[in-house]
Image: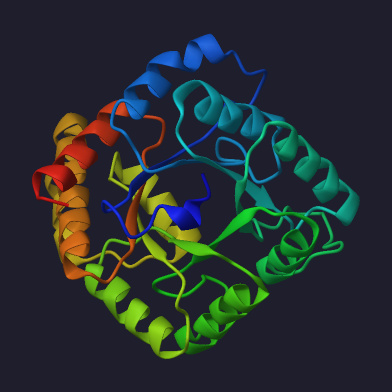
């Protein structure tokens, strides 16, 4: 199923997972996959690597397992900033070989020492994929602006370029301030961005994790999050519980606002996180 076909029915809730860095032993991933599949997600996206940036052979393999063995639409991430056309073509062939019809086209993080080759921006990759394949292509969006862009209006112009290049749906970067997401959606819609937008939510699992993500993504930290981190700084289990509850409140408010077309949970390969967030959203009636 194409991701563009899931909108319009039951409010879609999806998850992001990452493949192992080394050789993939699917048996070691069964507990995680079984748990996430048991929540009946609209789709599951698979990143290029655990904390890495390059295209991973494990991405296509894991996305194929999710689709073929669990019957869940999968989305394979593909990055381009450190790749040339031949490398992208090879990876596309691998994705096609697994029968995957959905990809998330991202620029990716620049690797120190590597120079940009055939692609500079995600919009160029999207345009290339739409001309060469029949993929349903998703793209990233940034509620508080991309960390390398100083102007949110300019950033939304770049987002519109992704849509014009052929992007079929959008998944947002993580954020902790729903009002920032609502303002972003209003601005994007006003500028003609009319494809579905899924709100990306990451439950807080630890202080170092969240500090790193805020540095990488440029997400702001509301006072409620600061108080949570200070309160449970030395109580990991309570911080995880509070972080999951905060994410659930975010997701339920967003689902009820009508401002997002779906919720995409950065589950970090934790089935208990997926189950908790899905239950909260469904129990709220969405």
Relative to 152, say whether 64 is above or below.
above
Give the residue displayed 35% in from the left and 77% down from the top. Answer: 185
Question: Where residue 100 sits in the image (x, y, percent)?
Answer: 63, 39
Question: Where residue 247 sits in the image (x, y, percent)?
Answer: 22, 50
> Is residue 207 something one can see in this rendering?
yes
Q: Nearer the viewer, residue 73 or 24?
A: 73
Q: Quadrant of residue 260?
A: bottom left
Question: Where residue 140 sits in the image (x, y, percent)?
Answer: 52, 62
Q: Is 235 displayed left or right of 267 in the figure?
A: left
Question: Where residue 236 sits in the image (x, y, percent)?
Answer: 21, 32
Q: Residue furthest right?
A: 86
Give the residue displayed 27% in from the left and 53% down from the top. Answer: 11
Q: Nearer the viewer, residue 195 or 15?
A: 195
Relative to 69, say whether 132 is above or below.
below
Q: Is 60 displayed left or right of 179 in the figure?
A: right
Give the residue displayed 81% in from the left and 53% down from the top. Answer: 83
Q: Residue furthest top?
A: 27
């Amino acid at each position: 199923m194409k991701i563009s076909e899931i909108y319009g029915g039951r409010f879609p809730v999806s998850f992001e997972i990452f493949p192992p860095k080394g050789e993939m032993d699917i048996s070691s991933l069964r507990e995680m996959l079984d748990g996430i599949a048991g929540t009946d997600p609209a789709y599951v996206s698979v990143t290029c690597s655990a904390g890495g940036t390059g295209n991973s052979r494990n991405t296509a393999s894991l996305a194929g397992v999710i689709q073929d063995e669990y019957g869940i639409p999968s989305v394979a991430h593909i990055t381009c900033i450190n790749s040339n056309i031949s490398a992208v073509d090879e990876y596309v062939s691998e994705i096609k070989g697994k029968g995957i019809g959905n990809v998330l086209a991202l620029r990716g993080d620049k690797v120190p020492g590597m120079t940009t080759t055939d692609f500079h921006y995600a919009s160029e990759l999207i345009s290339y994929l739409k001309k060469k394949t029949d993929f349903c292509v998703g793209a990233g969006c940034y509620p508080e602006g991309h960390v390398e862009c100083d102007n949110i209006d300019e950033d939304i112009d770049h987002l519109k370029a992704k849509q014009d290049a052929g992007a079929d749906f959008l998944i947002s970067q993580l954020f902790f301030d729903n009002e920032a997401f609502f303002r972003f959606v209003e601005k994007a819609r006003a500028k003609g961005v009319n494809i579905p937008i899924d709100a990306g939510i990451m439950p807080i699992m630890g202080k170092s994790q969240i500090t790193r993500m805020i540095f990488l993504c440029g997400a702001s930290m509301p006072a409620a999050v600061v108080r949570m981190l200070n309160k449970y700084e030395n109580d990991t289990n309570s911080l995880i519980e509070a972080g999951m509850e905060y994410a659930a409140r975010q997701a339920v408010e967003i689902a009820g606002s009508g401002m997002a077309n779906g919720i995409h949970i950065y589950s970090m390969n934790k089935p208990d996180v997926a189950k908790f967030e899905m239950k909260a959203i469904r129990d709220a009636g969405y």
